[in-house]
Image (cartoon, rainbow, N blue to C red):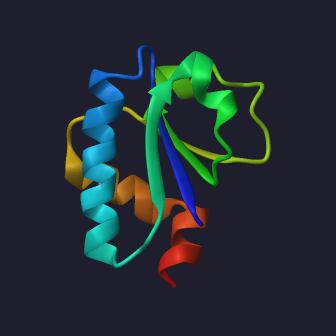
Amino acid sequence: MRKIIVVCNSGLGTSMMIRLNVEALLKEFGVKAWVEHTDVTSMDAHDADLIIGSSYIMDSLDSITGIEMIGLEDVIDRKYLRTRLTESIIFQRWVG
């Protein structure tokens, strides 16, 4: 199963909001994937195909290799998230 991890500092507010937007966009595109939100310190416990979070968090995850990461400058704007997702190599494979 395809798996997306949405990460923020605490694993509560921001990651949950992004997760809901990701799930809505996946539904729009007809893509089935498991989406989980978590905090930065717990994300290693998840085996992900794609990691999404704010840019400042993604910039701090330089130890992660082999997993595509999407850093968001705007964590609220769904249209912006749509653009970032459609630019993703992994997501393009899932859609196409």
Residue at 52% x, 66% y is 91
* Residue 60, above or below 15: above
Foreground residue, 61 or 31?
31
Residue at 24% x, 60% y is 24
Image quadrant in which you'd find residue 41: top right
Q: Residue furthest bottom?
A: 96
Q: Let me know if residue 41 appears in the view.
A: yes
x then y, percent, for residue 32 = 44, 71
x then y, percent, for residue 3 = 56, 55
x then y, percent, for residue 8 = 43, 23
Number of numbered tags placed on the structure image: 0
The quadrant of the rendering that contains the N terminus is bottom right
Foreground residue, 40 or 36?
36
Is residue 41 toward the left or the right of residue 77 in the image? Answer: right
x then y, percent, for residue 6 = 45, 38
Is residue 22 toward the left or the right of residue 92 in the image? Answer: left
* Residue 77, above or below 92: above
Residue at 33% x, 53% y is 22
